[in-house]
Structures are given as C-alpha cells and as structure tokens.
Image (cartoon, grey):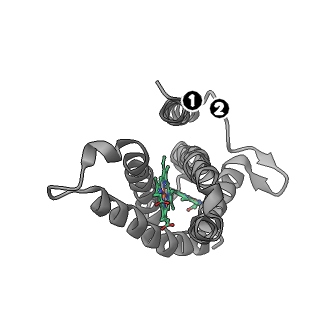
C-alpha cells in the first residue's frame, strides 16, 4: 500500500479511538490549560487552521505550482488532523455531565459539514480514478460538492463561535 492513503486511514482510526476514549472517560478534555479548557483549545486550533488554510491553499497553489504536491499534502493531512482536534472537541462537549449538558444545535450541523468535507476530500484525493468522468457522480461533481461545503463551514462556524462566546 502507498503511504499517503495508509497515513490518512491511520489518522482517521486515531480520531475514532480518541473519540471513544473521551466518551469512555479514559481521556479528560474538560480540564483547563491556561485560560481555556483543552477541548476549547482543540476546537480553536482545528477550526482556525481550516478557516485560514482553505483560502490560502487556493492562492498558494496557483502562485507556486512547483510546490503543488507539498501544498496538497498540507491540505490533506492538515485538515485530517484538524478534523481529529474538532472531533475531540465534539466528544468533550457530548460527554459533559447531565447537569452541565450543552444545548445541542448548530455545533451538530457544523460537525456533519466537517464529516462531509473529509469524506468528499478523501474521495477526491484517493478514489478519483474509480469515479471516472461518466455517470451522474463524476470527479468534477465531487469536487464541486467538496468546495461548496466550505461555504457551509464558514456560515455555521460564525454562528457557533458567537454562541460559544455568549
Ligand atoms: C468545526 C468546528 C466545531 C465543531 C464541529 C463544534 C461542535 C460543537 C458541538 C456539537 C457542541 C455541542 C453544542 C452544540 O451542538 O452546539 C459544541 C459546543 C461548544 N463549542 Fe464547538 N465546535 C466547533 C468549533 C468551536 C470553536 C472554534 C469554538 C470557540 C469559540 C467552540 C466553542 C464551543 C463552546 C464554548 C461550546 C459549549 C456551548 C454551551 O455550553 O452551550 N466550538 N461545539
Ligand atoms: C476541513 C476540511 C477541508 C476543506 C475546508 C477543504 C477545502 C478545499 C477547497 C476550498 C478546495 C479547492 C481548492 C482550489 O480550487 O484550489 C479543495 C480541493 C481539494 N481537496 Fe479539500 N478540503 C478539506 C479536506 C480535505 C481532505 C481531508 C482531503 C484529502 C484527504 C482533501 C482533498 C482535496 C483534493 C484532492 C482537492 C483537489 C485538489 C486540487 O484541485 O488542488 N480535502 N479542498
């Protein structure tokens, strides 16, 4: 197996194991590290990286075509790691005790958006040859879906951060 798909799957498996560990209370993300809880640091770092690198990639890849491969690796693996951090935040929120349970809302929609971004990204990167250019769902369709989901991310993250900050 080539190393890129293998590494991508390892990061996704680690994400699942980390989420399970948080739900099982083996890993505690509610404790404070400086001004914020660990779960909030994870959310900030993950979401900021996505918000900044997504448009940055668009410009960098056109300005530096020679570095396209490196830029795409930062895109793929950087966003997979951001997804790991965001999943840790989600698991931390959903495993809060009943008396301090958050009101579920746009955070869930945001997480679904992230799952779809990662899924369509994985397809674009690793399954494109199998999708072909004929039929109702082509590589181009997948790319459009992948890029459009970014707008959903921006709209919902603004609402969520404003809600989170009260
Ligand atoms: C893509 C990134 C993110 C996802 C998927 C996500 C997901 C969630 C979910 C599912 C909840 C439970 C409540 C709800 O459903 O709204 C939640 C709560 C929370 N999130 Fe996020 N979050 C993300 C980013 C952030 C960021 C960047 C911040 C920084 C301000 C943040 C701060 C909070 C806070 C403070 C709560 C607790 C709200 C309460 O107690 O009612 N989240 N998040
Ligand atoms: C949070 C997650 C993600 C966001 C916001 C995002 C955003 C984007 C955007 C805006 C583009 C269009 C770039 C352009 O036109 O220059 C794109 C392309 C692409 N993305 Fe993602 N992406 C995410 C995750 C992923 C992941 C996890 C992978 C792979 C494992 C991936 C693989 C790709 C590929 C292969 C392309 C097409 C490459 C190209 O034409 O340059 N993406 N993505």
Residues tagged 2 and 1 counted as in contact (Cβ below 8 A) = yes
Above or below 113: residue 78: above
Which residue in the structure is indicated by mark 1?
21
Residue in the picture at 54% in, 42% down: 95
**How many other residues sit within 10 Å of disc 1, few (<14), some (14-19) or many (≥20)?**
some
Does residue 44 appear left or right of residue 89 in this picture? right
**How many other residues sit within 10 Å of disc 2, few (<14), some (14-19) or many (≥20)?**
some
What x and y, as percent, mark residue 30? 68, 45
Residue in the picture at 24% in, 57% down: 138
Report the number of discs: 2
Query: Which element type, helix, strand or loop, lies under badge 2?
Result: loop
Query: In the orientation shown, which residue stands out farthest toward the top?
Result: 1
Q: Is residue 94 visible?
A: yes
What x and y, as percent, mark residue 128? 34, 47
Question: Which disc is residue 27 wearing?
Answer: 2
Query: In terms of image quadrants, where is residue 104?
Result: bottom left
Residue in the picture at 40% in, 66% down: 149
Does residue 100 appear left or right of residue 130 in this picture? right
Query: Which element type, helix, strand or loop, lies under badge 1?
Result: helix
């Amino acid at each position: 197996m080539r190393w890129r798909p293998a590494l991508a799957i390892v990061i996704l498996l680690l994400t699942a194991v980390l989420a399970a560990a948080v739900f099982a209370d083996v890993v505690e993300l509610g404790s404070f590290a400086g001004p914020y809880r660990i779960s909030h640091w994870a959310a900030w770092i993950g979401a900021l990286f996505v918000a900044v690198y997504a448009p940055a990639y668009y410009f960098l890849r056109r300005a530096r075509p020679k570095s396209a491969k490196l830029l795409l690796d930062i895109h793929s693996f950087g966003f997979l790691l951001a997804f790991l951090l965001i999943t840790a935040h989600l698991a931390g929120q959903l495993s809060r005790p009943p008396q301090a349970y958050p009101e579920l809302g746009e955070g869930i929609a945001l997480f679904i958006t992230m799952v779809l971004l990662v899924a369509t990204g994985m397809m674009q990167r690793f399954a494109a040859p199998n999708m072909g250019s004929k039929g109702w769902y082509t590589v181009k369709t997948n790319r459009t879906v992948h890029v459009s989901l970014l707008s959903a991310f921006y709209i919902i993250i603004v609402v969520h951060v404003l809600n989170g900050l009260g």
